Amino acid sequence: MKIVHYSHQLGMGGTEKCMQYFVEYLHNAGHDCYCIHNRQKTDEEGCYREKLLLDILDNEKVLAYSSEEEFFSILAGIQPDIFHVHRSGRPDEFPIVPRLKDYVGKCVETNIFGGYDSTKIIDLTIYVSDYLNKNARHPNRKTCVIYNPVKEPLHTKNLRSTLGISPATFVMGRIGRPDDYIFDAISLRALKIIEGKGDYDILYLVQSPPPNMIRVAQDIGLKKVKFLTAPIVTDEEITSFFNTIDILAHARKDGETFGLNIAEAMIHGKPVISHRSHRANAHKPFVKKCGFFVRRDNFRQYAKCIGILYHNKKKRLTLGRRGHDFARENFLLTNIGKKLEECYKQLHT
């Protein structure tokens, strides 16, 4: 099959990462794969994912457009059997416009936020979690759930020596986009309580912190936090980060419609602490498999959970194994990619 995957930008987000993984799987399975993205939006996001997609495909198959006419000119040259767009689900959003049907066989959307679009242009809507499938308003078309994929850890190396972190130090980790909109201070305020106890050999290692996260940490006088501001996007770098930490200290103001960094922590055997959000809570059942899910804004409860995992290594390892086993069964790219490929085949026949 000739397959095009589309995302507005190729930055650091989990949506683009999952698209990259699907393209990699489908390419390796023998399909003729392409990726289309908006040049300006990718440039604004730092082009991080574009370089990785170019390693999988080549310059002639990772294609950027700067105008709608250029986009349709690119599609006319490909004439894909499947056009797969990764988006919020919002209606009247380019490129899900009537003209699209003249250039593609079947149209698939991965709906990451549960937006409702009744358009007949789309043939299949994929929700990234059971939570979205249950709570989103369903259009009058075929729908299904396909989780976001992860890969097994690539190696056993960590960053402790490079960063000057003792092997004995208990390391909490945060990884995500440096976006103030998603920042929640619950983990920082919990760490402040832990610091007040004085007898914890602990560090909060934060990858790609939002600017407000750095500011709040400074304002409340946190000492046991280290910020890594250079972005990481490769699988090798991600594995090195997770091999460095003991637990994932997850915090996100708007919650998760899936929670890719939680799934990545699970596949790396790391327990997770997270919290209820005022918006999306798709991550709750995953976190409860491998850690603690605390009440919204309850940083004292969050701190208590840190203390439990700090003092009880046996519990930490048990939760980590449980999370890893669940992730292997439910999130691995080899299985998730097969499920997506089967959906394509059913549409194409």
Image (cartoon, grey):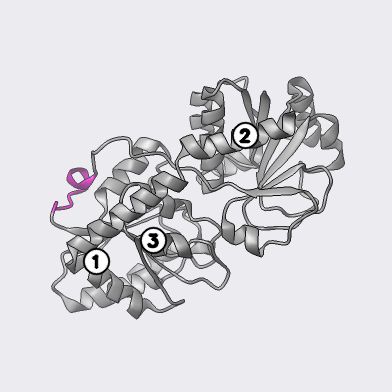
Residue range highlighted in magenta: 159-167
Placement of the N terminus among the 4 image quadrants: top right
The reply to whether residue 223 is visible in this rendering is no
Say left or right for 254 vs 220: right
Q: Secondary structure at mark 1?
A: helix
Q: Position of residue 323 (x, y in %)?
A: 35, 54
Q: Position of residue 215 (x, y in %)?
A: 40, 67
Disc 3/disc 2 C-alpha distance (Å): 28 Å
Identify the residue shown where x is 31% and y is 46%: 241
Q: Amino acid at mark 2?
A: Glu
Identify the residue shown where x is 41% and y is 71%: 185
Q: On the image, numbered disc 2 is attached to which residue?
A: 342
Identify the residue shown where x is 57% and y is 55%: 129
Q: On the image, numbered disc 1 is attached to which residue?
A: 309
Q: 307 or 190: which is nearer to us?
A: 307
The reply to whether residue 212 is visible in this rendering is yes
Q: Secondary structure at mark 3?
A: helix
Q: Amino acid at mark 3?
A: Lys
Say left or right for 338 vs 202: right
Q: Position of residue 304 (x, y in %)?
A: 28, 76
Q: On the image, numbered disc 3 is attached to which residue?
A: 289
Mark 3 or mark 2: name the one nearer the start of the chain.
3
Mark 3 or mark 1: name the one nearer the start of the chain.
3
Identify the residue shown where x is 47% and y is 65%: 284
- Residue 76 vs 118, above or below: the answer is above
